[in-house]
Image (spheres, rainbow, N blue to C red):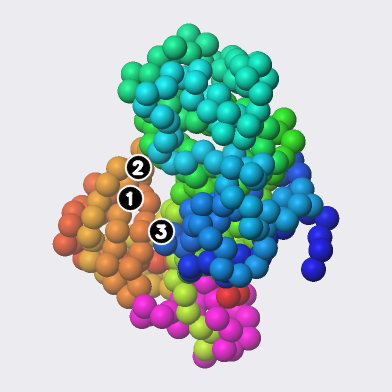
Amino acid sequence: MRTTAHLDAAVRAGPLDLTLTAERGETTALLGPNGAGKSTLLRVLAGLVRLEEGWVRVGGHDVSRLPAHARRVGLVPQRHALLPHLSVRANVAYGLRARGVGRAETRRRAAEWVERLGLTPLADRRPRTLSGGQSQRVALARALATEPDLLLLDEPLAAVDATAAVDLRRTLRTHLATFEGTCLLVTHDPVEAVTLADRLVVLEDGVTVQDGTPGEVLQAPRSPWVARMLGMNAYEGMVADGVVRLDEGGTLVAADLPAAGTRVLATVIPEAAALYPARPDGSPRNTWQGTVGEVSGVGGRVRVHVLGSPDLVAEVTPAAAATLRLTSGARVWVSVKATEVRLTGL
């Protein structure tokens, strides 16, 4: 079936079995656990992995059987893959040369992108003398210099330190805002996904499990992996007898239950869980006893992993942690209001 989307792909390769469309000027972040097929998808689109079945169309042109160098696709791998014997300037020019661009035009476009990415002071240096963040800038300049219709970014910030990541994220946001093609971004970082992407696609086991705006996906995740990535407690289960019976054991009561037999993902944010030294009185519908496992500090709060049925991560104030004497092995009671249990159908 034909589509007017700038990127239109139906991919059957290895673990992948999915369709994907994206518009010109749109940045789509691909999220999912290791082995979900995210990087494989990028390599299929780039022409580096053979497409077993399906098609890849970019800008209305079928590139399914074209070799990598003949596609108007730019790939920035997680590890920059710069050529060690070439200077920064020559690395940026390499993609243009590989596509048969004339010498004068190659020099002009390489110089333009060296300057635009702030690489002019480094232009004559070799990759071994660069930091991780500088190397990723060179890889990005090399990809953008080819004026791709499709830009593929495979965890571009994963191999750089935190300070460099902030600067590189700002650079990416600036250039993606004016990029006229389509961009696919693989990331494990929710901050990166929210700040850079217009749309999130969640992959698990090679298939799409959720597709929506960052707000839609992050407020109501349909994937336990995404929920946990966001710091939520996440449990799969089935509605039965007025409760959610959790696959891992235990039950949860929620304020608004769907029909019996419905498969759901139940999420609870750590701040919504209260801890007590003895069984609490009052209205909370979800109460169970557990054993404190790991205790750690997170941004002025104390994160407590409680082992029970189910396991749960709670966040409390340092004063509460001291009062409760929250050390590994301590017994505590967990309480969660029914109104704090969010359910998403699976």
Q: Residue at x 63, y 32 (%)?
A: 100
- Label 2 residue SS: strand
Residue at mark 3 to residue at mark 2: CA–CA distance = 25 Å
The C terminus: image quadrant = bottom right
> From which residue to which does the magenta span run?
241-266
Of all residues shown, which one is farthest toward the top? 121
- Which residue is under mark 1? 303
The verdict on residue 226 being magenta is no
User: Residue 147 location in percent, x, y?
Assistant: 68, 32
Viewed as shown, does residue 322 lie left or right of 24? Answer: left
What's the amino acid at mark 2? Val
Of all residues shown, which one is farthest toward the left? 329
- Which residue is under mark 2? 298
Q: Label 3: few (<14), some or many (≥20) within 10 Å? A: few
Q: Reply above or below: 20 against 344.
A: above
- Going from the N terminus, do you reach mark 1 or mark 3 first? 3
User: Residue 215 location in percent, x, y?
Assistant: 65, 51
- Label 3 residue SS: loop
Q: Quadrant of residue 245?
A: bottom left
Foreground: 16 or 158?
A: 16
What's the amino acid at mark 3? Asn
Asked if one can make out residue 58 in the rendered structure from this viewpoint, the answer is: yes
